[in-house]
Structure formats: C-alpha cells, structure tokens
Image (spheres, rainbow, N blue to C red):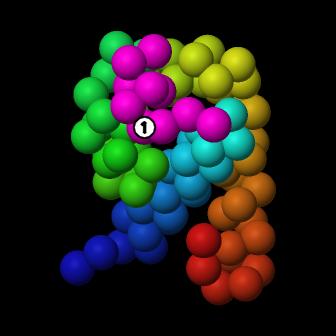
Amino acid sequence: MQTLKDADDDRFLAAIGMVIAERRLARGLTQQELASSTHLHRAYISDIERGIRNVGIMTLHRIAASMEISVSAILDMAQERMQVGTQKGAV
C-alpha cells in the first residue's frame, strides 16, 4: 500500500521530470542530445522525464548545467507545479 508520503514523493519526481522535459524541448534538444551533453544514457533521461527515476543531486546538476539553468530553478519550478497540481487535484 502506498502512503501519502510515497505519493508526494512520486508527484515531486514527476514534476521534476516535467520541468526537465519542458526546458529541454524549449531549448530544442532531443533526449539523445541532452544525454550526450550530460554523459548519461538516453533511456535514463527518459526515465527522469517520466518521473520514474529518483534523480541524484549531481545528475540534476549536470542536467541543469547542460540546459543553462540552476538546480534551484528546476526545484522551484517543480515545487510550483506541485502546488498548482494540489490545487487542481493532480500534477
């Protein structure tokens, strides 16, 4: 059985993934291009964007640097997305 904390964790990971995907697309990058610039596998980027990977801080730093955004900006945008999602009932 999933607890409320687990559900919040899952929603936060999904929100981070959505932010990364949106920023990547806004920069005109494919998952493969982002993966190459961060020395990660394309499938790993896909998993992060789908919210099924608990991304480590150093990986998040590499992704953020590659997209010329701060880690804190990614986290802030994800937090905002969660707050909006909470108000609407979903992320």
- Magenta: main secondary structure equals helix
Tell me if residue 11 comes above or below residue 61 in the rendering. Answer: below
Q: Is residue 60 visible?
A: yes
Asked if the magenta segment contains residue 67, the reply would be no
Quarter containing the C terminus: bottom right
Left or right for 28, reference 57 = right
The residue shown at (30%, 34%) is 42
Quarter containing the N terminus: bottom left
Question: Foreground residue, 52 or 79?
Answer: 52
The residue shown at (56%, 34%) is 29
Q: From the top left corner, tell me how far across and down residue 59 is, in percent.
A: 42, 22
Quadrant of res 86:
bottom right
The residue shown at (72%, 24%) is 69
Query: What amino acid does circle 1 point to?
Result: Gln
Quadrant of res 83:
bottom right
* Magenta-drawn segment: 28-37
Left or right for 25, reference 32 = right
Asked if the magenta segment contains residue 32, the reply would be yes
Tell me if residue 9 comes above or below residue 46 in the rendering. Answer: below
Q: Which residue is mark 1?
A: 31
Left or right for 24, reference 10 = right
Tell me if residue 6 comes above or below residue 64 in the rendering. Answer: below
Q: From the top left corner, tell me how far across and down residue 48 is, in percent.
A: 39, 44
Question: Foreground residue, 8 or 91?
Answer: 91
